[in-house]
Amino acid sequence: MRYYAIVVAGGTGNRMQNTVAKQFLLIENRPVLMHTLEAFHKCVLNPDIILVMNIHQQTYWKELCDTYNFNIPHLLIDGGKERFDSVKNGLDRIEGEGIVAIHDAVRPLVSASLILRTFQMAAQNGNAVAAIQPVDSVRRKTTANATEAINRDELFLIQTPQTFQISQLRKAYLQVFRNDFTDDASVAEKAGFSINLVEGERTNIKITYPQDLELASFLLRKTGF
């Protein structure tokens, strides 16, 4: 069995209020993206890593790799207009069958054990999507001035990796892009596949806002990742 990881690095610094893209910001003296790739490199299944990145950011990434002596093997390819297009570009570079994990570049604290569990479940059941349940109470807006409570036990917060048998994901990505394709699970579900959830990790945070960098640094120091 061959294993692959497509890491999608198309983010910008908009919500970080920073001109530097999120994946290049530093956590514990290294760019976020380097921590992310290292997590997949540590997985015992040794997946081939495909890094999908905006063509205008690739020179800077290569310079960072030289600066930080970063030598984890990965194939760097061009991203697309939408995340959907970037994942499709990654899939196009994979020959044959196997299992592929799709992961956000800005989730640098994903553990090798979670990666392994998604690979194992996808091999058995077709796909495996990391998810956690909310701990806060949840309400839904019903009208302009009204809300109603929702049973949080029925809700899941979706993370990455989202891992699939390659044949399944290829079929899903034959579809035309839609605005409601927010992640790979939504693409696969629209193609008729049932989605299997695997318990994610509360430390598997997505770097979106400035305070997320501080939390990620704290968690890295605590875990010694």
Image: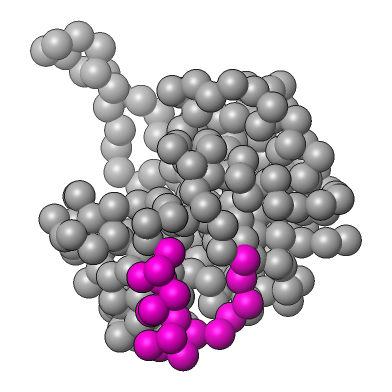
Q: Is residue 63 magenta?
A: yes
Nearer to the camera, 23 or 94: 94
Place residue 59 in its image quadrant. Answer: bottom left
Q: Give x and y (percent) for residue 101.
A: 65, 54
178 left or right of 134 in image? right
In percent of the image, x 35 and y 75: which residue is there?
A: 31
Q: Give x and y (percent) for residue 95.
A: 81, 52
In percent of the image, x 76 and y 71: which residue is there?
A: 45
Q: Give x and y (percent) for residue 43.
A: 67, 74
In percent of the image, x 61 and y 45: which residue is there?
A: 89
37 left or right of 58 in image? right
**Furthest residue in direction top, as rendered:** 143
Identify whether 35 is placed above or below 56: below
Identify whether 179 is placed above or below 215: above
Identify whether 201 is placed above or below 138: below
In this picture the colour scheme is one colour
99 left or right of 176 in image? right
Q: Is residue 153 visible?
A: no
Residue bounds of the magenta highlight: 58-75
In percent of the image, x 56 and y 63: which residue is there?
A: 76
Place residue 195 in its image quadrant. Answer: top right
Q: Give x and y (percent) for residue 122.
A: 75, 49
Q: Is residue 112 magenta?
A: no
Q: Is residue 10 visible?
A: yes
